[in-house]
Amino acid sequence: MSDYRIERDSMGEISVPTGAKYGAQTQRAINNFAISELTLPSQFIAAIVRVKRCAAMVNHKEELLSEPLFQAITTAADKLLAGAYSEQFPLDVFQTGSGTSTNMNVNEVLANLAAEQSGLSVSANDHINMSQSSNDVIPTAIHVSAAMAIQHRLLPALEYLEATIREKARSLDKVIKTGRTHLMDAMPLTLGQELSAWAEQVHKSKNRLLESQQYLCQLAQGGTAVGTGVNAPDLFAEKFCAAISIDTGIEFVPSPSLFEALSSQDTAVAVSGQLKVLAVTLMKISNDLRWMNSGPLAGLAEIRLIALQPGSSIMPGKVNPVIPEAVAMASAQVIGNDSCITVAGQSGNFQLNVMLPLIAYNLLQSIDLMANSCRAMADQAITGFEVNEDVLAASVAKNPILVTALNPIIGYLAAADIAKKAYAQQRPILDVAEEMTDLSREQLSELLDPLKLV
């Protein structure tokens, strides 16, 4: 028992490891929730710490918290935000649905650190949690952490990926290739035009996330237990948002309805939906790259992705499209996370959603996965791929679908006959069209010029 101390809470005594900075309620949660090895992300814990620091600031200005207590709490919060004591937040994601265990974990660590450095008696509930409830702290931390992650990590990554694709597209704007619909030969386009579609998808994903960001910046803080603001001073929500806006550099405002902010996680569901759209975009780009890179002998072999590592433990010389594969898997995870968040969002029973830790974990994971995937895609796939121009040119020259350009002159059925013969004989469409129409070779060359068709 020398490795343990006795802590007390409203339920009685419990043994807590001597070196732990947390207290009784955290220990009870450790004992109760051995569901997984998943813990809440560090940026989410940091968001709760920011909430505590800003709440202490408002409480101090309202003369509810003394100057020494305020300084002690602020100093302790600063240490945690600097990365100290990260091991003191061990709780499982799968815990009480309000996140009360994690809220109290932060409260207890802050209280113990503040007491140690000040010599004061600091209460986790009465001082650190003053004017708050888990019921508004955790929804607020979800919004703050997600807004910060999107602002500082995901949006810059999206801008970088879009710029990288557009630059690559400009460099390939004169390279003509065979288009494909249904994976079958279609009319030609330039490789630059093909990539421009990717860039536009990324651009629109960025804009959708920017639209969602405004709702993330509406906070639940000040609603306390059920949205009425019980035990919080007047205008606490407004004063808190002013403080955390300065703290984070992002403009936060109180939710128009604190009742909605506690009982609903619709904003998180909506943001997750936009992350799913981005995941679909990245999976589409990944699959296009994989197809274009396929081969080098039995595939399309239109491009050569950067060779990053050996592709097989048994087949020497094999190199695989590992970055598009990794990004596709990350995208699949985000799509799965969205389903999880959707189910969790339905659990707003009466005045409180009770799957908040799950929403926090999955939402932040999705943001991180997409930010990292965008940069990997830009740096390790898009920038350095090389084009097999000879392969592209040969495919275009033999593409019978070019006969589509003759439809207005000879009609669809006659053009179809030309295409079928060219396919069957594996001959250039120009030669077959010259035999089967009254048009001169010069006229046909003009009409079927791929550069003009794109």
Image (cartoon, helix red, strand yellow):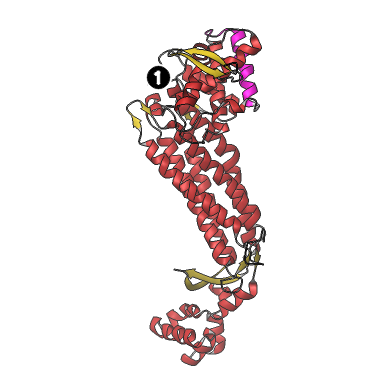
Quarter assignment of residue 195: bottom right
Q: Position of residue 198 (x, y in %)?
A: 54, 57
* Horizontal side of residue 23 vs 414, given as left or right: right
**69 lies above or below 413:** above
Quadrant where the C terminus sits is bottom right
On whether residue 348 falls in the magenta region, the answer is no
Quarter assignment of residue 170: bottom right
- Say if residue 370 shows up in the picture: yes
* Horizontal side of residue 64 vs 258, given as left or right: right
Give the residue displayed 45% in from the left and 86% down from the top. Answer: 418
Q: Which of 195 and 265 is in front in this view?
A: 265
Q: Where is residue 229 in the image (x, y as percent from the top left)?
A: 41, 17
Q: Which of 228 and 72 is in front in this view?
A: 72
| Type of the residue with mark 1 | Ala
Element under disc 1:
loop
* Horizontal side of residue 349 vs 201, given as left or right: left
Q: Which residue lies furthest to the left in this view?
A: 350
Q: Which of 265 and 393 is in front in this view?
A: 265
The rendered magenta stretch, by its main secondary structure, is classed as helix
Give the residue displayed 52% in from the left and 60% down from the top. Answer: 287
According to the picture, the residue beneath numbered tag 1 turns out to be 225
**371 lies above or below 242:** below
Q: Where is residue 124 in the image (x, y as percent from the top left)?
A: 52, 14
Quarter assignment of residue 267: top left
**Range of magenta residues:** 63-81
Q: Position of residue 206 (x, y in %)?
A: 53, 46
**48 lies above or below 188:** above
Quadrant where the N terminus sits is top right
